[in-house]
Image (cartoon, rainbow, N blue to C red):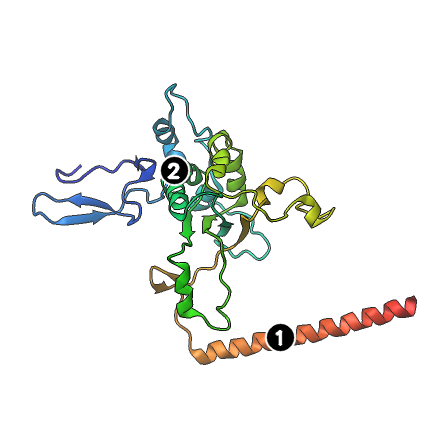
Amino acid sequence: MAPHQVEIQDNQLADGVPTDREAGLQTLEDQSNGHTKLSLPPDPKPYPSHRSAQNFKNQHADANGLSRISNTDYDSVADRVRRGEEIKLMKGQKPGQKFVLTIAGYKKEGLSEEEYREYMTEVHSPMVRCLMARYGTEKWTMIHNTSTTRPLMAKIFDPQFANIMEYDCFIQATFTSIEDVMAMKADPYFKKYITPDHENFADTRGSQDTSASSWGSGHPLSEGCIADFAGPTRMTIGYLEEFINDGKVNEEPEDLDVILARQDRILKAREEKKKKQTILSFKNSEAYFVAG
């Protein structure tokens, strides 16, 4: 190693978070000329990979030397994709397209906005972020909606931007496969620490009627997973479509005439489909009455 370089260990963690991860850079001081040099870490992934599982396990050992996060050797689908392994795509999924879990949450009754935000960022996040990374989560963000930020909507009100959501927070996690999320939720660490911790800051029950009876018998949510959907805190999973990143448009700009021509084609095809569905519906109704 050169005299004035700093060795960067594989995915070195500081308080469970990679050093200077936000910038993705490690600052190195060149004492020979006083200039600061920037160098990428050897492995830019924001969490220990399968290659550094033992390192990760050691840094999360309890007083008895036992791993708190049990499955440190888990080889996530995300890791396998990075190594070039092909995975089966779901219907509608594009090659390389990620999934995003979005949670719209309310704070626990009795908590102030400040207490809610403090707990989520200072306690819950440090408790779970390394586990999420271990199981292939590629990005995790929180959006806190407060009494200070909500009034900003008044500046952009119009007939289309007229309804304000009252959720206290939006949480989004980006991942490659639902298999990784399922494996994370099955980890003993998640069950012991994360699941009960939700009750310390989130309104997981609420006043809204989301009991099995409100959906009716036979509804897919009427059995088995009520707890995950109970109360005003709601969640869903969708495909990630990214168009601007770090202020840069992800694709080459297109001529407006080309875009308008595509718009016209799509809208016309939509109208044709609607007409065909109306005709088919009428014929089916006519056949029903004739048969009756």
Residue underneath mark 1: 269
* Residue type indicated by callout 1: Ala
Where is 151 relative to 126, above or below? below
Where is 18 relative to 98, above or below? above
Q: Quadrant of residue 57?
A: top left
The percent coordinates of residue 61 (x first, y second) are 37, 25
Q: Quadrant of residue 123?
A: top left
Residue 233 can be seen in this image: yes
* 33 left or right of 283 in image: left
Residue 49 can be seen in this image: no
* 46 left or right of 33 in image: right
- Residue at the (49%, 43%) spot, across then down: 109
Residue underneath mark 2: 123
The percent coordinates of residue 119 (x first, y second) are 39, 41
Tell me which numbered mark, 1 or 2, is placed earlier along the sequence.
2
Where is 283 relative to 18, above or below? below
The percent coordinates of residue 33 (x first, y second) are 7, 47
Quarter occupied by the N terminus: top left
* Residue type indicated by callout 2: Val
Q: Helix, strand, or loop for circle 2?
A: helix
Quarter occupied by the C terminus: bottom right
- Circle 2 packing at 10 Å, graded few (<14), some (14-19), many (20+), is few
